[in-house]
Amino acid sequence: MQHDSTIAGKDEGQVPLTCVVDIDTSAAPPAEQFDLYRSWNSNLGDVTLLREKFRSFKARQQVWQLGNLALMSLDYRGTGYCRRWTNKKDPVFDHWILSVPLTASGNAAPSIPGALHWHCLAAPYEAEGEDDGALALLLPRDFAFSQPFDLAIRPEMAALIVDYIQLLHRSLPHRMERDAEHIVVATTTLLAACLAPSRDHLVEAEGPINGVIMARAKKLIATQLAKRDLSPEKLCRDLNISRSRLYRIFESSGGISNYIRRQRLLRTKDILCDDKDRRSISLIAEEWGFMDPSTYSRTFRREFGMTPKEAREAGWLRIEQAPRLSGPLFAGGGPPWNSLLASGSIANRS
């Protein structure tokens, strides 16, 4: 009872948002793992294999409840199976499912999303796939539209939903329970704008849509950061948005040009702190778009409170004094997180 009262006394807003379902097949014998996986969603439909079974089927499923919505994550990478999904003939539920198939890209890189699929659990449906996982958003049948058993989703709206579902999945493990209500509102307004477009719906969904556009822009910037032609104008063309909207979206970051400049400065700072890279400071700066050494030095100092030369000396000194990562340091289980945090290698740079 004391434990319960302690929990009740906590600030509910500080409680992490956790999944209501988190299961995997590791506890089952290898030969029974697929059957266990198949049972997880047997009340929604049936999964069958189109090729002979392998020795095991490693899979994990997580579900987050968001009001009357639910986000499901399925991970079965490396199984190599071709599968068929079929809706139940006598459906128990009539929800809509918006799903994004995922293909593993290797080297711990994020999975590559496929095209958006959608269907109603109450209608006949069958699909095949050889993906490595999926994200699925489950919506109540009467959600913001009244189509009987199909949805008319324009390609650009489908792409927006795909990006939003991925963004939602990445963010949920870092959210608190107090955020759930706001997440539901954002998700509802965005989906309403995409599935039943109207001027009012688009206005209401401006916030979450801008969030998706910002995520797209940051991804583009990260992949094109070293290119000389990276500019607000090029981003507007690539994202198919107006210049004013791009500037408005990045206003909280000090503007789009300031965001790009800061990301480039961070790249040069990382390189300067690498004792294996002995190139001149001016050459490193030029690689990342800073053509004038004096301007680069002033900008760098204004951003980080030290000159590039001082940053290089401090970085090299820190590396020389840091303990070497040998086997015994990992004996306690896992890498030395304090060292990783201090180095900034896993810091949030958004």
Image (spheres, rainbow, N blue to C red):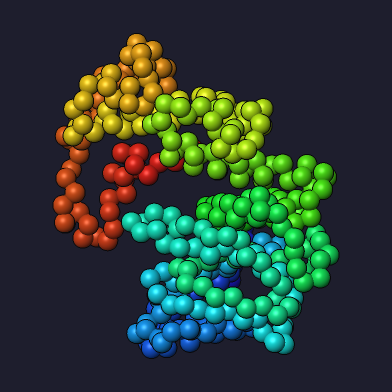
Outermost residue toward the top in this view? 294
Residue at the image position 70 percent from the left and 80 percent from the top: 124
310, 56: nearer the viewer? 56
Residue 168 seen anywhere in this rendered image of the structure: no
State the image coordinates of residue 88 (x, y, percent, origin top left): 67, 84
State the image coordinates of residue 19 (x, y, percent, origin top left): 56, 65
Residue at the image position 70 percent from the left and 87 percent from the top: 89
Q: Is residue 76 left or right of residue 123?
A: left
Residue 307, image quadrant: top left
Q: Is residue 171 left or right of residue 178?
A: left
129, 107: nearer the viewer? 129
Residue 102 seen anywhere in this rendered image of the structure: yes
| Image label count | 0
State the image coordinates of residue 286 (x, y, percent, origin top left): 33, 22
Compared to residue 182, the image places residue 124 above or below, namely below
Q: Is residue 78 left or right of residue 10?
A: left
Compared to residue 92, the image places residue 135 above or below, namely above
Residue at the image position 70 percent from the left and 76 percent from the top: 121
Q: Quadrant of the N terminus?
A: bottom right
Residue at the image position 49 percent from the left and 39 percent from the top: 220
State the image coordinates of residue 168 (x, y, percent, origin top left): 58, 54
